[in-house]
DNA sequence: ATTTCGAAAACTGTATACGAATAATCACCT
DNA sequence: AGGTGATTATTCGTATACAGTTTTCGAAAT
């Protein structure tokens, strides 16, 4: 059939069995997580509907659902990415310190053998991407690694909570990934976490993810400091 | 105009300034929380729309939003109350133990003087309702109390996370509230928590909410055991 | 009496349309 | 030239309509 259409139905063709709203929702989630939606973009139901070749209603449903899930924020004119400020990022690190140690402990007990092998492979991908200086693939590999163990968390409520602010985590990660100096810290942190998973050591997994979150916060703060230093001269003129 | 209509617009007249979807949503939340929706009831958008005298769309929006918030569950025929899985309830108690101690600590530091006074008044309401045997008002007072301190949690990400599974918490609460024997435990638990808030004692608040969650879990497990005991004989004939 | 097949009813998802509210633009006045 | 008011355009909420799907009820046949 018409696989050569721009991306009207082709984007939706992947989600067979779902209704249009859900398919649009999933496509938009993917775009948000991939960073394809700019901070200035305004998602309007009519525009989304036109892009996917459907009426306003499915687009509207998808956007409202995304807003309710925290992926988007309703504004007076269309939906926009929720504003993540410095304070909120620190709050999320706080939340991660509360949740992720337990989550990693559960994952250490819940990961199947094949999942362990997949994590191992993903970790090798990450290491390879780092050595190649391939930042995008490193980012992707880390994302897959994280999704891999989070999906093995047996407490589904906890798992869903982790997944919910994953997008904010991604945003912060993008900042820290920008500095290649952080890459070894990230890869080694994941490697140590993986070792704990492989040995089924829930305690070690708990400790190491906590350490990993602290390291991530330190890296973020350093990046933030650096960004502030560069921004201050231009921002100084405005009282 | 037609203020004498059955309860089409009269139910909605309370929520001035909101759109119809939000008003219907709020009314239905109230009904669910009051237990006016039976486990066998199926909420269909056309019926809801007819009752409120509006078209399907606002009703549909409200129902979908309720479903997404966890108040309802979509089924093949209308929306129904979500069946609360025993496993999931235990998971949520786990999550609460992770999050609420920190949240209570932050609330102890963040509550304003007037908010403290409001909590005090609410606690008195709860105590009065308990003495009167007024289960509905006791339930409401406890809900207001909890909302009161949760709203004072300075970490907004943590606060939103707590609010997100508040509905499941409510469902479990409804089970434990059903046994009047639990009422003193609940009220005293809140009172101890309030004392910590009033004294700005973050450590005590942390400890007491943790104790409170454990007590709640114990009460739930007892109620669950009791329910199972009664259900087993009738279920025995099948399978 | 039970089962099976079919028709009618109900429900969901989507399309289209219309009115109201709000933001943006432009013209006009000072 | 800058501010102010009016007009236009965009967007949202809601209404109505239609098609596809599922369910339920009833009738007929075994």
Image (tube, coloured by chain):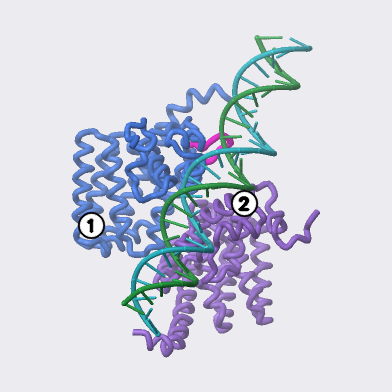
Chain colours: A purple, B blue, C green, D cyan
Q: Is residue D19 above or below residue A13?
A: above
Q: Position of residue B45 (x, y in %)?
A: 51, 37
Q: Which residue appears farthest toward the right when viewing the image?
A: A1
Report x, y in % for residue B10: 34, 37
- Neighbour tally class for label 1: few under 14, some 14-19, many 20 plus, Cα within 10 Å: some
Q: Position of residue B15 (x, y in %)?
A: 34, 46
Q: What residue is rendered at 19% in x and 45% in y?
A: B124
From the image, which quarter does the C terminus of chain A lie in? Answer: bottom left
**Residue tagged 1:** B115
Q: Chain of mark 2?
A: A
Residue B88 shows in this picture = no
Give me the disc on residue A222: none
Q: Quadrant of residue A121?
A: bottom right
Residue wearing tag 2: A55
Question: In this image, B181 relative to C3: left or right?
Answer: left
> Please, what secondary structure does the residue beneath circle 1 have?
helix
Q: Is residue A161 magenta?
A: no
Magenta span covers which residues? B74-80
As rendered, which of B74 and B54 lies closer to the eye?
Answer: B54
Q: Is mark 1 in CB contact (under 8 Å) with mark 2?
A: no
**Numbered disc 2: secondary structure:** loop
Callout 2: few (<14), some (14-19), or many (20+) C-alpha neighbours within 10 Å?
some
| Callout 1: chain | B
Taking the spot 60% from the left edge, 68% from the top edge, the residue there is A34
The residue located at (56%, 80%) in the rendering is A178
Q: Residue at x 52, y 71 (%)?
A: A40
Q: Residue furthest bottom?
A: A233
Task: Please give the count of numbered marks on the rendered protein.
Answer: 2
User: A148 or B3, which lies in front?
Assistant: B3
- A89 above or below A55? below
Residue B78 magenta-highlighted: yes
Q: Are marks 1 and 2 on the same chain?
A: no
């Amino acid at each position: 059939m018409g696989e050569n259409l721009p991306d009207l139905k082709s984007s939706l063709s992947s989600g067979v069995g779902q209704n249009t709203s859900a398919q649009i929702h999933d496509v938009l989630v993917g775009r948000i997580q991939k960073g394809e939606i700019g901070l200035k973009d305004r998602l309007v139901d009519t525009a989304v509907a036109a892009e996917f070749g459907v009426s306003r209603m499915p687009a509207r449903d998808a956007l409202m659902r995304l807003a309710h899930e925290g992926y988007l924020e309703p504004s007076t004119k269309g939906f926009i990415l929720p504003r993540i400020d410095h304070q909120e990022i620190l709050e999320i690190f706080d939340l991660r310190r509360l949740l992720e140690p337990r989550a990693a402990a559960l994952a250490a007990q819940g990961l199947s053998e094949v999942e362990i092998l997949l994590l191992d492979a993903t970790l090798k991908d990450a290491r390879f991407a780092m050595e190649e200086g391939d930042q995008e693939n490193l980012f992707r590999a880390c994302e897959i690694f994280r999704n891999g163990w989070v999906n093995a968390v047996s407490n589904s409520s906890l798992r869903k909570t982790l997944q919910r602010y994953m997008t904010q985590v991604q945003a912060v990660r993008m900042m820290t990934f920008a500095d290649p100096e952080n890459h070894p810290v990230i890869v080694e942190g994941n490697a140590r976490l993986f070792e704990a998973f492989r040995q089924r050591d829930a305690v070690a997994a708990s400790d190491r993810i906590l350490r990993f979150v602290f390291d991530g916060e330190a890296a973020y703060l350093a990046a933030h400091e650096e960004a502030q230093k560069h921004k201050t001269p231009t921002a100084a003129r405005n009282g």
